[in-house]
Amino acid sequence: MKIGVALAMLLAVAVNAQWTDAERNAGYVVFAHDVLLNLPQAHVPSHAAVISKLSCALAPDEYESVQLGIHAIGVPLDSIKVVVESELVVKIYHRIDPATKARHAAAAESSLGAILDWVPPEINLQRGDAFGPLATGDSVNFWFTFHAPLGTEAGTQHGKIIVRPTGKPETVLDLEITVRPFTLQRPRASFLMWMREDMLPVWTGGRAAPRETVLAIFKDIAAHGHNANWFYPTGRYDYLPPRGCHSLDRLMPLAQEAGLLDPRVPSAICGGVPGDRKGKAVQEVIAWFEAESRRRSLPEMLAFCDDEPQYPGDADAVHEILNPLRNTSMRTVMTESSIAGAYGYMTPGLCDVHIVHDGVVTKELLAEAARMGSSIGTYSYRIWREGFDPLRQRFYAGLYTWTHRLSGNWVWAYHHGHHRHAWFDLDHHEPMPVTGWEARREGIDDYRYLQMLEDSIAASPDHADPGGDPSADGRALIAAKATAWLAALRSRLAGVIPNQVEAGKPLALAEFNQIRNTAADYIERLGTVADASDRWPSTTHTKEEAAYRGRTVAACIVGLTAPDVTTRRAAAWELYERGPGAAAAAATLAAALADPDVRMPALHALEAIGPEAHVAVPEIAKLVYHPDPYIRIGAALALGEIGAPIEERTRTSRRLVSPHAALVAEPLIVVFADEFEYNSHSAGGILGYLGTAAKPAVPKAIGYLDREYRLQLAALGLITGLGPHAAAAVPKLLEIGGSEFKNPMIIDALAAIGPDAAAAVPALEAYGAEQSGGQQATALYALCCIRGNPADFQKVAALLSAPDTDKRELVERLKQLGAKAKPIVEEVRPLLQSKAFADYHEDLQAFLAHVEAGEVPGVLFEW
């Protein structure tokens, strides 16, 4: 301890020694801090960061943020005020102050105080030009967001930033703002932020929030570069025009008034088909809705049909939702949280716009979407919450969207717990940003600069440069240089996973602005391109299979070898629609896997055929080594249906092991070891059904148990599925489970292993004794599976009969025990007559049926 204190004192002396006498006498320093980095209270700047000038550049109608820090030296600063002298509009923020945080912590209706206990306070920017007190050795940020209104004259504007600590000498910084000589185009990608009124702070009124509050929110979203919206709830359309439709009557008009909606860029309505109409009535509703949208000058409205459906587990539900919209003019959109979903739901006529999770976009995914005429966008719920990193927000919004030429970039959520991008003080409804919200706007502007440069290149590649020698430095040469620069940048960024971005990986902090400045320089030299004002176009669904619809399997087999790629794809898709009835085509489909243009529909067709496609396994197995994870997941899912076909395409379904399970195990184990975690996750779920054939995957699963969540989930799924075959995992399961078993899936894995997990009994007994409700039921379930003592089953029966117990979880565990719980059947049977179990009669009957049939269903691991 004494050594630690001494080292801390030496460090403090060293830090203090970097300041000059003048700075120590002043009691503080003013320093620069990049807006892509949060500024913690304990941050100590280097002397090199101390500044006397602050500068930035922006185009008319663009916002630009800069950040400076103030660090207290020697004695505390009672208060600090900043003054900005500039002809431009500026908003001034600082980190949330302790008094505001304390008020929220004390208010029962506020969740912000609790969130700030574990979310860094420096991410919350509070409107104001004064802060204090500031303790010795601490730092505070002042954040300035400048706006150059349309019509602002180009050139360099000079101003001042004055820092005035109470009782200390003021510091005057030179302010230099360059206004570019062009106005940026609007983005052609759809930038959307999920905002639900019912997730707003309770004191704002939620769904009953005043009109002015919602309008201010929409204006804030628009001012942060967004051009589309997600309207929730959709409302019912049982009557036309609809009655009391919240989105049509309130939200859409407010979004238009706020300038949020760009008529060229799609927005989305939540709920799929407007209302619940079926059959011909769907056409009637859509015709009315589209006519009304055009009358109001609304953008195209996509039908948001499902949120993160799993594949293949949710396939039946997805088809039920989307099938009524086939052959209509309304395009559909879904969010897909895994690459398996992006593969599984990209089939003809099903969904038009796929919004895939960050990091899921791949070259082959984009190529297949282009072949089908589908649109690919991206969304994220983790890009902000994982580390609260503005740098990742900026990269994801701008460079990631541009690199992959995505149709949209959506983020969750405007305000929802710690996902929030804005926050509200108790005293007013003004939305205030978090640092990542400001960074997201910077990213959208990055996209706009690069979009405009591409347009400038396309519009004038062969005109002379008025500022140079046409023969040596003409626009053709400049356009060629700009094209090469863009190509090199896109190639450099193509493989980057957004939530893995950090300073220096793949870009140094300074490179973000360097990229923008380079793009701006090329735009000035090539000339600008006017913003298009076209309204949204009419669209149709993809109908690739139409040419072969209804043809025989034999005709499709011939079509697979046709010289025309359109014919080959149409034949493959028709075979996909036939499912097991297309088994005769399996060998020809296997050969088609070598054709990049037909590979994906061929994989879909083989997957749909199932076990009878086993002749294709050698060719499918080659694809698990393909460099693109989109191809690898398609191969894994096809192998899964051949070796362990899913019983029904529903979340609660099981796989049925086929005679070809051993044939697919080895290539699936390759996918389980895939560096792309989504693929490992899917492969683990399939392997868990293959029994002894999958045992070679157990060591890899054990290694995944203390890795990131998705890999841990893949490992637990495999171990739970293999049960006794994965007994080698018991020591590691106990190690990561600890005494608290915070992840109940670890207990399920131990239960599945059964008697070979006897080493876990003491920990499970101790855990169960301290728990109640569902946790206690889980522990008892595991003890019943591992040691099977009659006393454990009697405890289950006693809990079922006890008042105030979590009967839902107990009954579910009883079903999973099935025939193992035969000793307590007679105690359970009378519960069918109990009013307390009225809601569980179906589940109790299922349990009794399992006992009668001698079945032990075990845990169904949900992915």
Image (cartoon, helix red, strand yellow):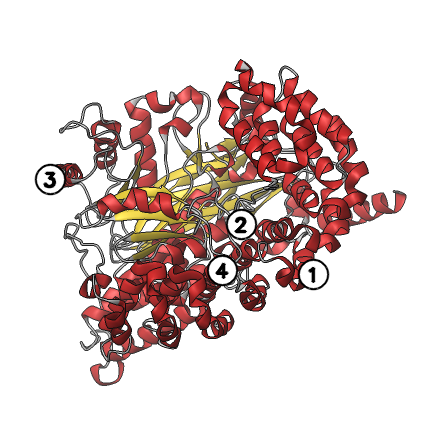
Q: Quadrant of residue 210?
A: top left
Which badge, 2 or 3, is on the more N-terminal residue?
2
Identify the element where label 4 is drawn.
helix
Identify the element where label 1 is drawn.
helix
Q: Nearer the viewer, residue 613 or 262?
A: 613
- Residue 766 placement, left or right of 102: right
Q: Which residue is tagged 4?
A: 640
4 vs 3, front mark: 4
- Mark 1 residue type: Pro
Q: Which residue is tagged 2?
A: 37
> Distance from label 4 to label 1 (Cα)?
21 Å
- Mark 4 residue type: Gly
- Residue 256 placement, left or right of 164: left
Which badge, 3 or 1, is on the more N-terminal residue?
3
> Distance from label 4 to label 3 (Cα)?
45 Å
Image x and y of residue 733, in percent: 72, 48
Q: Which residue is tagged 3?
A: 291
Q: Nearer the viewer, residue 766 or 204?
A: 766
Image x and y of residue 58, in percent: 34, 53
Which badge, 4 or 2, is on the more N-terminal residue?
2
Q: Which residue is tagged 1?
A: 699
Q: In the image, is residue 231 above or below residue 507?
A: above
Q: Nearer the viewer, residue 852 or 25?
A: 852
Label pair 2/3, CB-CB below 8 angstroms: no
- Mark 2 residue type: Leu
Q: Residue at x 47, y 62 (%)?
A: 642
Q: Residues within 10 Å of mark 4 (few under 14, many from 20)?
A: many
Which badge, 4 or 1, is on the more N-terminal residue?
4
> Distance from label 2 to label 3 (Cα)?
47 Å
